[in-house]
Image (cartoon, grey):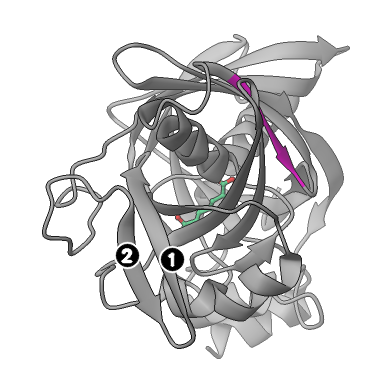
Amino acid sequence: MQNFFVKSHGLGNDYFVLNEAELSFKLNEKNIQLLCDVHYGIGSDGILLKVPSDKADFGLKIYNPDGSEAEKSGNGLRIFAKYLYDYSHTSGKKFTIETLGGIVTAEVTRETKGIASQVKVDMGKAIFDSHQIPVTCDSPECLDHPLNIVDETYLINCVSVGNPHCVILRDRLVEGEILKHGSEIENHPMFPHRINVQFAKVISRNEVEILIWERGAGYTLASGSSSCAVAAVMVKKGLTDRVLSLKMPGGTLHIEIDEDWNIRMIGEVREIASGYLSDELIADALCL
Ligand SMILES: N[C@@H](CCC[C@H](N)C(=O)O)C(=O)O
């Protein structure tokens, strides 16, 4: 199984899973960029690396395609849970996973003949404290706070769900607008760890539509942690109920936020391919 990978997606947000114990080389910022490149590597929105954990059943490291490490990923967690279940790393349907952004519980909620197709994740708590997110803001919570960029001022709402997010309410969602401003917001000096960006439009008390610009990845078709962040902000602002559907270009996720700000996410997950990294790709990765 040396250098075995499994590529999967959650609503078009694609990752491939590697097992550190089976890798013949060490991942670094540069070779992660190569592996995630669609022309020179496997191509993906990030890498999920299975690592040992002494605090949870499994450990997970999450890498963005620019080589940076993320604290958490909602789609990444569902994809990783499916990998653990499908490839017999676990016999149970419910298990814990340690990430840089905390320990979460994942549960396979739909499967056929040992292949998982839907996973529920208890993602942990939404945190609005500016220091913890982190966001450089003069208020303890950064809600409806103006953010000036080159030719626009947006009102931002910041939250951490283990990783940092900046939610901007819009009356109309225009893909070109997030493509134009996403990188500038992500890298704004207000965000010492950079930030994930969502443009969000409320459809009803139970439905919100979003567009996503991910830190370290750019525009993506879906994002689990972004959905959780938007849901938390909507509940905080009293704009929706606590059970809601998040509609993204890649599909819909279902999110629940309880009275203590614990977040639960449930959604689909699909495998795309599995195989072995070629010796040629590994040789190139070793040069970086
Ligand atoms: N696609 C993810 C989010 C991945 C991490 C993010 N880019 C970050 O740097 O925080 C998801 O589904 O949550």
Is the residue under label 2 in contact with that under label 1 (CB below 8 Å)?
yes
35 versus 133 height, above or below: below
Indicate which disc residue 146 carries.
Answer: 2
- Could you say which disc has been placed on residue 154 in the image? 1
Which picture quadrant has residue 162?
Answer: top left
**Rendered residue at 71%/63% (across/down):** 44
Disc 2 marks which amino acid? Pro
Residue 146, relative to residue 15: is it above or below? below
Where residue 277 appears, x then y in whole percent? 75, 65
Q: Is residue 100 visible?
A: no
* In this rendering, position of residue 181 left or right of residue 28: right
Closer to us: 221 or 142: 142
Q: Can you give x and y, in whole percent of width and height, for residue 107 in the image?
A: 59, 15
Q: Secondary structure at mark 2?
A: strand
> On screen, 193 above or below 225?
below
- Please state the horizontal and vertical placement of residue 101, each as a whole percent of the image: 33, 42
Q: Nearer the viewer, residue 273 or 73?
A: 73
Instruction: Confirm if mark 2 falls within 8 A of ligand 1.
Output: no
Residue 169's label in the rendered image is none
Q: Is residue 245 magenta?
A: yes
Whichever of callouts 1 and 2 sits on the residue coming sooner in the sequence is: 2
Query: What residue is drawn where x is 19% and y is 50%?
Result: 130
Q: Which region shows up in magenta? A: 244-248
Q: Is residue 237 visible?
A: yes
Q: Residue at x 63, y 11 (%)?
A: 91
Q: Is residue 93 within the magenta segment?
A: no
